[in-house]
Image (tube, helix red, strand yellow):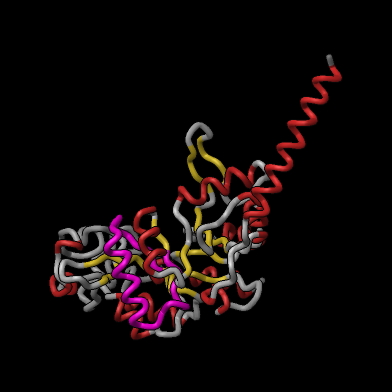
Amino acid sequence: MWRKVGIVVGVIVVIGLVVYLILRARVEPVAAHPFFAQFEPGQQINIAHQGGEQLWPSNTMLAFQNAVAMEVDVLEMDAHLTADGVFVLIHDATVDRTTDGSGAVKEMTLAEIQALDAGYYWTEDEGQTYPFRGQGITIATLEEVFTAFPNMPMNIEIKPDDTAVAQSLCQLIRQYNMTSKALIGSFHDNALTAFRAACPDVATSMTESEIRPFWILSTLGLSALYQSPAEAFQVPTTANLPVLGEVDVLTERFVRNAHAQNIAVHAWTINETAEMERLLEMGLDGIITDRPDRLHEVIGNR
């Protein structure tokens, strides 16, 4: 009896191994992309989140100009489309939180949006002072940023869950010859899928539904079976998963397995020096931060 059981188990193991080898043979590493060729091999990049949200009013020309002057590696920004078809840079779907106005971005014209004070909300002392109010700071357009910094790498998040917006973004990127300078991300599967279809030559990061299978396979030691749809993981350090609860996303194994398939790994949004140091030691390719000044110093001291 035990001999028969052993034979059955052996057959199952052999079949499983054959299936594994077949599936693994079909997986191709991510092809090298010009976006990442802008950086030195092994360079860990400083990605200024919204231009440096904790330093200046976010997604404004002031923030981007200061971040570039600080010599960050990448400008990160959030793109929405106005009622008259212009891409503006603002985190929220409405202007309420970050300006002195109110209303949905998609229902306002560019003129209406740029009449607002984009420095109105910013404070570093819990509302005791508002140093950027009344300084003429406006919501920036994506075209303004492309024009001002044509050679600057940019990480652009598609904020609306809208396939038409994604396709329009592709057209603007092509118009300004930014195909090798842009890395596009989104939390929305449909928007990112539409963008990839329209602009297959532009680098993209991945949505949660695309990252989760890799994390599971990596945890099980089967990451070699994962076929990546994009060039980069941009992830938080932890995440809440069904059944499992809060888990560590960024581990040495996760980073090592991603690199084995030529997938870049960026962490968000990391603002404390000790955490920056810990993650960089893990071998991350970059950090998205509201404090690019701190990260600049940390990287410089490595």
- Indicate the position of residue 19 as horizontal and vertical percent values: 68, 42
Residue lying furthest top? 1
Residue at image coords 65%, 72%: 42
Placement of 242 over or under 117, stated as above or below: above
The answer to which image quadrant residue 79 occupies is: bottom left
- Residue in the picture at 15% in, 63% down: 101
Q: Position of residue 134 (x, y in %)?
A: 20, 75
Which quadrant, please, contains the N terminus?
A: top right
Q: Quadrant of residue 264?
A: bottom right
62 left or right, relative to 114: right
The verdict on residue 173 being magenta is yes
**Front residue of this view, candidates 172 and 94:** 172
Front one among 45 and 154: 154
Q: Quadrant of residue 125?
A: bottom left
In magenta, the rendered stretch is 156-184
Q: Horizontal placement of 235 versus 85: left or right?
A: right
User: Which residue corresponds to the image point at 33% horizontal and 81% vertical from the top-left?
Assistant: 175
Q: Position of residue 215 (x, y in %)?
A: 57, 47
Q: Which residue of the protein is positioned furthest toward the right in this rendering?
A: 3
Instruction: Residue 48: tell me if it is visible.
Output: no
* Residue 130: x %, y % from top left: 27, 67
Rendered residue at 67%/59% (across/down): 260
Instruction: Tell me, yes or no, if residue 21 can be seen here.
Output: yes
Which quarter shows the C terminus? bottom right
Residue 220 appears left or right of 78: right
